[in-house]
Amino acid sequence: MSKSLFGKINLKKTAIVLLLFLGCKGIAQNQNSSENTVVPSDLKWSERAALTILNKYPRAWQLDGNEKPKWDYKMGFVLSGFEKLYQKTNDKKYLNYIKEYVDGMIDSTGNIKKYDIKEYNIDYLNPGKLLFNLYEITKDSRYLQIIGKLRNQLETQPRTASGGFWHKQIYPNQMWIDGLYMAEPFYTQFTVKYEKGKSLDDIARQFELVHNHIVDKKTGLVYHAWDESKEIAWADKQTGTSPTIWGRGIGWYMVALVETLDYFPKSHPKYKVLVEYLNQISKNVNQYKSKSGLWYQVADKPELFGNYVEPSASGMIIYAFAKGANKGYLAGSYKSTAKKSFDSFVKEFVKVDKKGEVNILNVSSNVGLGGKPFRDGTNQYYLTAKPKENGAIGIGAFLLASIELEK
């Protein structure tokens, strides 16, 4: 081979290598620039929040820092926002995120992995809401089977003497305010869809028990829980209520009402009762917001040392106000209140990072009552619950509030 020919071949090789290098460098630069703007800032808050969740938690079970898959109310709460976003945008990535979570949690025969009905954990019903639409879209019979199994849990769920669902088997005679959200929207959707509404009186009864026993007579706000037997150590010996009016608890109650009313027939005599409960709690909670329009961890004691405005409580109340106004359950003025509070929420709690991702600051960690070690439910107990960034309930509340305010 001649030297000139060899030189030409080398020159060609050098050119190809150089082109490849420059091409790779360009790709790397493009990748870096896209990484820095993963979430475009010109999108609405709802989609910015949803895209952030997809980026940070590629599998929905990873929400809230979970290390392994779990059939969990927190995932159900966040994914209910994805369901609403899918219905709004028709973007399949939101539906696929829900479906991947559910399919990862159930087996081929229509059972939820590690689900044990004997726990009578009312939290387990909440992710079940996702299955109604999944079944309608896919006609996968496993989804319908699981809907039926969760409904069967309610059939034998232990109850207080006056008919309220126990929160769990391990919490006898106790109704927790979050249990209303976990069970009633699912229960209402099921009974209207598959039972011709036969259980509507029972659903209204759950709210009536809360109204009669968990709503504080002085403030009109709700305590976290009620022990009808008044035997547990945290229960007030006269009323049976737990000691603290918890901001997120108010949020759970209000969201339970607006989402139950989604399915509760207007023709039913208890419909107006539920709307009235929503109006009462909305009027009262409006008196306890901060100057900027947000709500406190211990909701009725803004001046309490160490108390702070809390995003999951604030986000859920904003969502309930906006949805209540949009649906006509509440006066239109509540939409304006929700918008102002939402703006304050963004200023106080939202941190947008270099990737454009939406981070929610200072979300209270999960709290409960009783158990081991014993949780006494005092104001101080709620104030020592360590806040964290991007707690699932905070992210989910922001997503739901955003969707509703964008209507």
Image: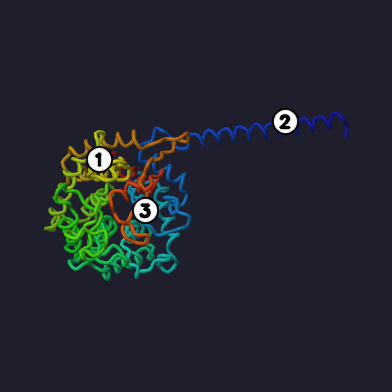
Residue at image coords 63%, 33%: 25
Residue named by callout 3: 74
**Residue 150 drawn at (x, y percent):** 32, 65
Residue closer to the observer: 114 or 220 = 220
Residue named by callout 2: 15
- Number of marks: 3
Side of 330 where 404 appears, left or right: right
Residue at image coords 40%, 60%: 71
**Residue 179 drawn at (x, y percent):** 27, 58
The span from disc 1 to disc 3 (Cα, nearest Å) is 27 Å
Contact between marks 2 and 3 (CB within 8 A): the answer is: no
Residue closer to the observer: 149 or 351 = 351
Residue at image coords 26%, 64%: 166
The span from disc 1 to disc 2 (Cα, nearest Å) is 70 Å
Say what secondary structure mark 1 lies in. Answer: loop
Instruction: Give the mark nearest the N terminus, 1 or 3.
Output: 3
Give residue 103's mark: none
Residue named by callout 1: 302
- Which mark is nearer the camera, 1 or 2? 1
The span from disc 2 to disc 3 (Cα, nearest Å) is 56 Å
Question: Mark 3 is on which residue type?
Answer: Lys
Which residue is farthest right?
2
- Which mark is nearer the camera, 1 or 3? 1
Say what secondary structure mark 2 lies in. Answer: helix
Circle 1: is it few (<14), some (14-19), or many (20+) Cα within 10 Å? Answer: some
Q: From the viewer's perspective, is residue 154 above or below residue 4?
A: below
- Which mark is nearer the camera, 2 or 3? 3
Side of 28 where 225 appears, left or right: left
Instruction: Give the mark nearest the N terminus, 1 or 2.
Output: 2
